[in-house]
Amino acid sequence: MPLLCMLYPFEETKHSSLHTSRAANVNYFLSDTALEQLHQHRQTFPALHQGRYFNYGGQGPMAESAIEAICQAHRQIQCQGPFSNTVNQWVIQEADKTRNAIAAELSVAPTTISLTENVTAGCNIPLWGLPWQAGDHILLSDCEHPGIVAAVQEVCRRFGVSYTVCPCFTR
């Protein structure tokens, strides 16, 4: 089960030895063992101890292991010297390991996985890579990050494309 789905709060209904989890209108059937693993996994997210988290996408809670990995990476970079050749090689190796792990989880080739510095950069790659033509139309939600909206507006200006905002978020 993808990690993203594990972060959503869920309601459980017991069906023999399976549980139905409703998160974002998607049903997952979990065995008792899988449900226990899910509960244990959620306990590694400090932000989830105090309440429920509904994924916003821009920022989200991190597991203790992720927080520790980030701290360890910063320690290693500081010990070896930021911007040194040693650190650069280490970052490249870590990125390759990450790309390979994601590819293995998704059963795809590592060359199909792109790692970017943030979601906006990741969205800009396909946005600017598409062969836009005058008259094309882009549909955005009203929950888009300003960086995405700005990029779409520039695509529209440069290529004669239009866009519409779909109201998904009720204020």
Image (tube, helix red, strand yellow):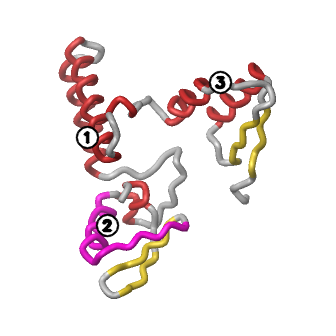
In the image, 170: left or right of 66?
Answer: right
The label nearer to you, 2 versus 3, is 3
Q: Give how far across and how far down residue 153 sits, in percent.
A: 73, 29
Amino acid type, label 3: Pro
Q: How far apart are marks 3 and 1 (CA)?
A: 39 Å
Q: Give how far across and how far down residue 96 sits, in percent.
A: 27, 29
Q: Give the SS element for disc 3.
A: loop
Q: Which of 50 and 102 is in front in this view?
A: 102
The local crowd at label 3, few if under 14, some if 14 to 19, many if 20 or more residues have their Cα within 10 Å, is few
In the image, 62: left or right of 25?
Answer: left
Residue 106 sits inside the magenta stretch: no
Q: Which of 15 and 38 is in front in this view?
A: 15
Q: In this view, does 122 lie above or below 7?
A: above
The label nearer to you, 1 versus 2, is 2
Give the residue number, with chain letter if any, for mark 1: 69
Which label number is shown at residue 131? 3
- Name the quarter where the N terminus is drawn: bottom left
Q: Is residue 106 above or below residue 12?
A: above
Q: In this view, does 66 lie above or below 82?
A: below
- The residue lying at 25 percent from left, 30 percent from top is 94
First in sequence: mark 3 or mark 1?
Answer: 1
Q: Which of 3 and 48 is in front in this view?
A: 3
Q: Give how far across and how far down residue 16 sits, in percent.
A: 33, 87
First in sequence: mark 1 or mark 2?
Answer: 2
| Displayed quadrant of residue 117 | top left
The magenta segment is 25-44
Q: Give how far across and how far down residue 12 sits, in percent.
A: 42, 79
Q: Give the SS element for disc 1.
A: helix
Q: Give the SS element for disc 2.
A: helix
The local crowd at label 1, few if under 14, some if 14 to 19, many if 20 or more residues have their Cα within 10 Å, is few
Give the residue number, with chain letter if any, for mark 2: 38
Q: How far apart are marks 2 and 3 (CA)?
A: 42 Å
